[in-house]
Image (tube, coloured by chain):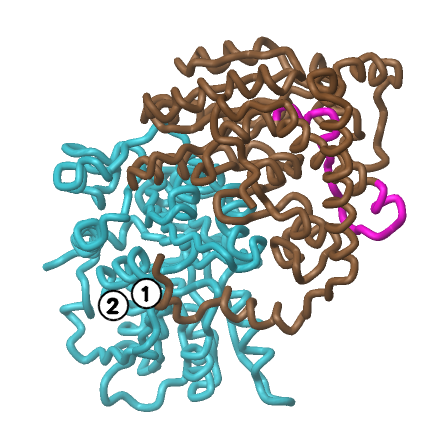
Amino acid sequence: MRTVLQALNEAMHEAMDRDERVVFLGEDILDPYGGAFKVSKGLSTRFPGRVLTTPISEAAITGIAAGLALRGMRPVVEIMFGDFLSLAFDQLLNHACKYRWMYNDQVRVPMVVRTPMGGRRGYGPTHSQSTEKHFLGVPGLRVVAPNALCDPKQLLLDTILSGDGPTLFVEHKLLYLSSVGKPPNRPVLEVIPGDPSSLYPSVLVRIAGAPAARLTIATFGYMADLVLDAAWRLAVEQEVFVEVVVTTRLSPLDATPILGSLERTGHLLTVEEGTVALGWGSEVLSLATESAPRRSTIVARRLGAWNVPIPSSRPLENAVLPSIQDIFDVAMELVG
Amino acid sequence: MDRILKSTCDLIPAELMQEMLRIRLFEESTLHEFSKGRLSGTTHTCIGQEASAVGVVSALRRSDVVFSNHRGHGHYLAHGGSMHGLAAELMGRRTGVSGGRGGSQHLHFPGFYSNGVQGGIVPCAVGMALAEKYKKSQAIVAVFLGDGTFGEGVVYESFNIASLWRIPVLFVVENNRYAQTTPLLSHFSGDFSLRFKAFRIDVEELDTNDVTIIREAADSITASVRETCEPRAMVLHTYRFSPHSKGDEVRDLAEIEHYRQFDPIILLRSRLSDEEYDLALSTARDEVSRAFGQAELDAWPDPADLLKAREELLNVCGRSFRH
């Protein structure tokens, strides 16, 4: 089994090997520790001059990355926990994401900020959040989330080597342990790639040979793993069939594959691990509504975390974050 | 047009005066144009602070990088920026150096960058200098901070890393004694130089508006940044005669009058003959008047171009860009 963690680590190695302009900055990323979640394992041994372990200074290292990028390098920053992105927000919002535009397209800022995100490990209120929603819709910022189905290695590699603007790359902590590719215990799942020309792919997953799906479930990142489990249970236990659309580029949002599926199913459920209010799912539902034909009806729900800080204790955390059962239940409410 | 003086052997008072007058008259015209309603948005002029702009920037090479702040017209002009491009930018014209998108605080030409958000430019400048170090270009980066900027935490993060990683960056502090309208005593504790020394960054502190003294110091400090590939700092105590922005003057007029005896142009005036001074003055006056005159005739930017740029910014594919 090859995990997403291994795939991302391979991408970092290959990016640094292929392009000398790639510089990697972050806290505690040197071997033998190799980063808090080990995505950086082996890099400092292999590329000692270009792997820079930093003080605990998220704002400065993000700003330094912007400066490196403006002067011809391709920096990658690791923020140890996605929760700490708030410290780098000004550097992204008012600096990195502004330069190209406010200098009249005369410059590019090809930088990547990678960060482990999400809960389910009992880390409590300040080390478990899914903060990506706060970065969606920032002009000039691309927000990308890998998943197990969409070749995470290629996605990170392309983001580092071919991206031409600031990109936030959101890696869920449990996704690291997922196996790359479709779940091995679900041979009848059919994974259909979206637009092959896009740097940021999406996939549509359904059960091969099943009757027409009655529900589209749109999701990203690690939640795709849970959604696929829920989809399987819906099919086996209730004979409710769904199409699952998994996207990698959250912002700017390309909802085309989601809307395409919705046209077939007529029902939409969005699933994210972050809080629901004013989040990714809200935007997907807005686009679905705006693109719907006149006098048509869209039946839709959003599923995400409760709008509270994330508790540390396992039963409490499990209650707050969306579960397979939650997905199952909401899907049944919609089409059961 | 290479207006940058290269080394101490070029340290000719007439040239330094010429540079300072370009900035002084440009800034005076800027305020005048605002009062006539021909400029919109906002601006922060550096009238009174010309010696630090010219003294430091003229010691740099054209290949060096300047990162400036909200009060950046002087740094921009001293580093060789087009005066017409700046005037047009202030007037929101298509020919503006940032095409009218940036305005007074967001200026760019190769080797020059500015952003109006306090403090945040400092790590960016450190990153640029690190890039130049990787590229072995011998270029250094000078970043301009004001006294007010010292309230931002990211500044200290940046000092720490610049020292730790031996990054060839020059921190230039222009202490004009006010953070917008708040006097130094109300926003700043302790000492400028000690802040740098705490990070083992060598610092030179000058309490003068004499451009020749600042230039001499900058010559040796920039050479030292280049040779040692380490950060250095200059703390320049100065004063601005103009308001923070446009019509927001709250300082005691007697205080402003007191500092006028240290006007950098007056301080240098006696080193020039009348003919030299008159020539510098009329040359600057002509250039400023041409810059604003031309800019006013220039076309406005077309929002249709903005739509195209928006599509590119959304950048659905993003494969194409290479440095």
Residue at the disc numbered 1 = A224
What residue is shown at x 60% (from left), y 79% (from top)? A290
Disc 2 is placed on an element classified as loop
Q: Is residue B302 above or below residue A194?
A: above
* Disc 1/disc 2 C-alpha distance (Å): 9 Å
Q: Chain of mark 2?
A: A
Q: Is residue A116 visible?
A: no
Give, as a single range, the part of the protein colored magenta.
B32-52
At which x and y percent is residue B99? 63, 59
Left or right, residue B231 beside residue A210: right
Q: Residue B273 in magenta?
A: no
User: Which quadrant of the structure image shows residue A256?
Assistant: bottom left
* Mark closest to the chain's N terminus, 1 or 2: 2
Q: Amino acid at mark 2?
A: Leu
Q: Amino acid at mark 1?
A: Ala
Q: Which chain is brown?
A: B
What residue is shown at x 65% (from left), y 27% (from top)? B14
Using the image as rendered, state which of residue A126 and residue B86 is in the foreground: B86
At which x and y percent is residue B29? 80, 41
Using the image as rendered, state which of residue A279 and residue B230 is in the foreground: B230
> Which quarter of the image is occupied by the C terminus of chain B?
bottom left
Q: Which chain is cyan?
A: A
What residue is shown at x 85% (from left), y 28% (from top)? B249
At which x and y percent is residue A119? 36, 47
Left or right, residue A330 beside residue A196: right
Question: Looking at the image, how many numbered discs can be counted on the residues?
Answer: 2
Give the class, few, some or many, for how many residues have Cα within 10 Å of label 1's Cα (few <14, many ≥20): many
Q: Is residue A111 visible?
A: yes
Residue at the disc numbered 2 = A149
Q: Chain of mark 1?
A: A
